[in-house]
C-alpha cells in the first residue's frame, strides 16, 4: 500500500511568444491539451493542463506569451498571462535560446525578479542549440533572476522533460488533488474543439491569414448514436479573408474541417460531425461576447 502523501500545486508556464510553452505543457501532461503553432501568440486563453507524477498532481497554467500589448485582445492576453502566475507554487520561465526575442524576454525577467514564488528557468530546444552559447545564456539569465533551478530540455522531443517533471513535483505542497485522476485539462470539450479548429486554421493558412481570425463555438450536441455534432463559426475581419478561408470552390475550409475532425475524433474517442461556416465581422476583437467565450477579461 502506498503511504506517500498526496501533493497538489500550481505551475505557471511563462515565456515570450512562441517559446514552446504549449508543447511543453502537452509533454508534461502526456497528451495534447493545448494547441501549438509556428505562429507566435497562438495561446489566447489560460488553458490548464493537469500532470501527474506519482502521488503529485500539478496544475499547469499555460499562459499566453507575454509581449507588448497594442490592441484590446493583446492587453487581455497579457493580463491573462500574469493572472495565471498569481498564487502559483512555481513560476516556470521557458526560453527559446535560438530565437531569444530579447525585447520581450528582458521585461519579463525584470518582473520575475520582483516575484517571491519559486522560479524555475527552462532552456528549450536543446536539440537545436549549441552547448557553449546555451551555458552562457543560462549564466546570464541566472545573474538577473534568482532561479531555484535550471533545466535544459527539448519540449518537442521530450529530452530532459522527465527529470524536470520529477523536480517540479517535489516542489509542490502536500494537499488533496483538485481534479480526478483521469482529467487532463479544465477546458470544456466545446472550447477545446474550437481551439483544435483554430490550430488547423493557422497551420493550413500560414502567412495568408493574419491574427484577425477566431473560432467561435456555436453548438455541441451528443447524438443518440454515440457521436457528437459540433458547429463552429470562423470569424474574420474582411471579405478578402473570408475568401482565403473558403478557398477555391470551398476546398480550403473543407481541408481545415477534415483535419480538425480527424484530430477531434482521436481526442474525444467518438465519431465527430463537424460543421464550419465563415462570418465576416469587422470589429470582432472588440466584442465582449467573444472574450467571455474564450475566458479572457474584456474590460481592460
Image: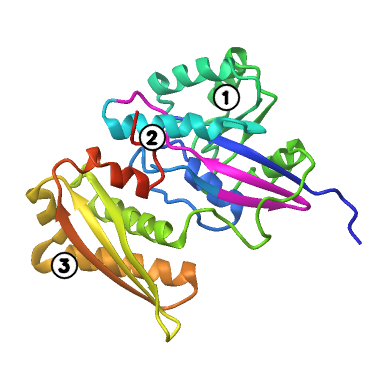
Query: Disc 2, disc 1: CB below 8 Å?
Result: no
Reading the chain from its start, which is encountered first: label 1 or label 3? 1
Q: Position of residue 154 (x, y in %)?
A: 55, 42
Identify the residue shown where x is 32% and y is 54%.
198
The residue segment tinted magenta is 49-69
Residue placed under numbered mark 3 in the picture:
251
Q: CA distance from mark 2 to mark 1?
A: 34 Å
Q: Can you say whether 52 is above or below 251 in the image? A: above
| Front one among 111 and 15 | 111
Q: Residues within 10 Å of mark 3 (few under 14, many from 20)?
A: few
Disc on res. 103: none
The kind of secondary structure element at disc 3 is: helix
Reading the chain from its start, which is encountered first: label 2 or label 1? 2
Q: Position of residue 252 (x, y in %)?
A: 18, 63
The kind of secondary structure element at disc 2 is: helix
Q: Position of residue 249 (x, y in %)?
A: 9, 68
Q: Position of residue 209 (x, y in %)?
A: 20, 46
Answer left or right for 153 relative to 177. left
Q: CA distance from mark 3 to mark 2?
A: 32 Å
Q: Nearer the viewer, mark 2 or mark 1?
A: 2
Placement of the N terminus among the 4 image quadrants: bottom right
Residue placed under numbered mark 2 in the picture:
77
Q: CA distance from mark 1 to mark 3?
A: 48 Å
Report if residue 288 is visible in the image: yes
Residue placed under numbered mark 1 in the picture:
132
Query: Disc 3, disc 2: CB below 8 Å?
Result: no
Identify the residue shown where x is 41% and y is 66%.
263
Amino acid at each position: 500500500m502506498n503511504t506517500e502523501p498526496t501533493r497538489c500545486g500550481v505551475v505557471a508556464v511563462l515565456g515570450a511568444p512562441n517559446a514552446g510553452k504549449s508543447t511543453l505543457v502537452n509533454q508534461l501532461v502526456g497528451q495534447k491539451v493545448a494547441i501549438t503553432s509556428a505562429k507566435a501568440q497562438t495561446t489566447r486563453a489560460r488553458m490548464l493542463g493537469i500532470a501527474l507524477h506519482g502521488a503529485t498532481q500539478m496544475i499547469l497554467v499555460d499562459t499566453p506569451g507575454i509581449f507588448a500589448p497594442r490592441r484590446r485582445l493583446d492587453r487581455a492576453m497579457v493580463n491573462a498571462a500574469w493572472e495565471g502566475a498569481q498564487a502559483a507554487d512555481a513560476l516556470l520561465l521557458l526560453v527559446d535560446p535560438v530565437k531569444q526575442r530579447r525585447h520581450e524576454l528582458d521585461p519579463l525577467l525584470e518582473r520575475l525578479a520582483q516575484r517571491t514564488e519559486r522560479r524555475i528557468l527552462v532552456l528549450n530546444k536543446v536539440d537545436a542549440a549549441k552547448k557553449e552559447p546555451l551555458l552562457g545564456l543560462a549564466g546570464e539569465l541566472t545573474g538577473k533572476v534568482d532561479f531555484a533551478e535550471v533545466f535544459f530540455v527539448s519540449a518537442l522531443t521530450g529530452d530532459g522533460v522527465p527529470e524536470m517533471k520529477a523536480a517540479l513535483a517535489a516542489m509542490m505542497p502536500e494537499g488533496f488533488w483538485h481534479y480526478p485522476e483521469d482529467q487532463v485539462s479544465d477546458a470544456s470539450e466545446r472550447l477545446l474543439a474550437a481551439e483544435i479548429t483554430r490550430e488547423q486554421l493557422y497551420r493550413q493558412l500560414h502567412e495568408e491569414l493574419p491574427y484577425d481570425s477566431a473560432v467561435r463555438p456555436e453548438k455541441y450536441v451528443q447524438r443518440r448514436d454515440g457521436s457528437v455534432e459540433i458547429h463552429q463559426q470562423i470569424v474574420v475581419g474582411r471579405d478578402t479573408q473570408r475568401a482565403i478561408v473558403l478557398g477555391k470552390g470551398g476546398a480550403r475550409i473543407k481541408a481545415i474541417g477534415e483535419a480538425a475532425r480527424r484530430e477531434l475524433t482521436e481526442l474525444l474517442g467518438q465519431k465527430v460531425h463537424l460543421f464550419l461556416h465563415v462570418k465576416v465581422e469587422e470589429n470582432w476583437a472588440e466584442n465582449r461576447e467573444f472574450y467571455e467565450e474564450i475566458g479572457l477579461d474584456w474590460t481592460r
